[in-house]
Image (cartoon, grey):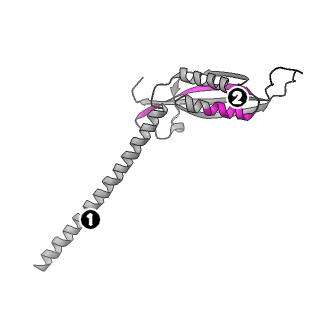
């Protein structure tokens, strides 16, 4: 009958619409997975998903000191601890850790500090989260005829060096 045919047609259209919606959701999820896989590869490449390597951080700081002829550079790396969840946002399946780093620098100008922080970010691996950085003009009296230029600025920075590991990994 005509009514049965119309009912079958309507049912077929509903099923077709549902299948199309399911296919669209599956394609969207596939796109999200591809983006997530790409992001995970970036994180692995950056070193964020590895154990912290303090030796790399120290080498990056020392190389930067030599490369940019920094006048004075002191640093201290504190013990690693769990990172503040507010800093990370939604942590997901990883446990985030932070190692506090304090940097003290005597510089000719602020570009010295910017180059040092850039070097640390590029060469030290994990994420360097700058918590605080301050500059003060050095007003100490200058010796006449000094062989080396005298520092003009004193910089003090506090950073957190972030790494992530699978939860439950020591």
Please identify the quadrant where the C terminus is shown: top left
Q: Tell me residue 153's x, y (percent).
A: 77, 30
Which secondary structure lies at badge 2?
strand
Q: Residue furthest left?
A: 1
Q: Which residues are magenta?
A: 91-118
Residue shown at 26%/65% (left/top)? Answer: 17
Q: Tell me residue 89's x, y (percent).
A: 50, 40
- The reply to whether the C-beta atoms of the residues labelled 1 and 2 are less than 8 Å apart is no
Residue shown at 39%/27% (left/top)? Answer: 168
Q: Is residue 54 above or below residue 96?
A: above
Where residue 21 sits, quadrant-wise, is: bottom left
Q: Is residue 111 magenta?
A: yes
User: How dense is the environment of label 1, judged by Cα within 10 Å: few (below 14), some, or many (20 and up)?
Assistant: few
Is 43 left, or right, of 30 in this rendering?
A: right
Residue shown at 58%/26% (left/top)? Answer: 100
Residue ID for mark 2? 156
| Disc marking residue 17 | 1
Q: In this figure, what is the number of numbered marks?
A: 2
Q: Is residue 165 magenta?
A: no
CA separation in Å, label 1 and label 2: 62 Å
Viewer-nearest residue: 170 or 110: 110
Is 101 left, or right, of 146 in this rendering?
A: left
Viewer-nearest residue: 6 or 146: 146
Q: Tell me residue 1's x, y (percent).
A: 10, 78
| Disc marking residue 44 | none
In terms of sequence position, does the residue under pointer 1 or pointer 2 come before the other?
A: 1
Is 147 left, or right, of 78 in this rendering?
A: right
Q: Tell me residue 26's x, y (percent).
A: 31, 53
Which secondary structure lies at badge 1?
helix
């Amino acid at each position: 009958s005509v009514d049965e045919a119309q009912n079958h047609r309507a049912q077929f259209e509903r099923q077709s619409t549902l299948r199309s919606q399911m296919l669209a959701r599956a394609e969207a999820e596939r796109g999200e997975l591809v983006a997530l896989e790409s992001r995970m590869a970036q994180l692995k490449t950056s070193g964020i998903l590895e154990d912290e390597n303090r030796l790399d951080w120290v080498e990056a700081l020392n190389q930067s000191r030599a490369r940019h002829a920094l006048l004075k550079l002191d640093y201290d790396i504190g013990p690693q601890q769990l990172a503040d969840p507010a800093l990370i946002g939604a942590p997901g399946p990883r446990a985030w850790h932070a190692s506090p780093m304090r940097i003290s620098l005597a510089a000719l100008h602020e570009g010295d500090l910017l180059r040092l922080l850039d070097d640390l970010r590029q060469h030290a691996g994990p994420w360097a989260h700058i918590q605080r950085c301050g500059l003060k003009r050095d007003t100490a009296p200058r010796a006449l005829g000094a062989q080396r230029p005298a520092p003009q600025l004193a910089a003090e920075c506090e950073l957190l060096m972030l790494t992530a590991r699978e939860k439950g990994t020591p």
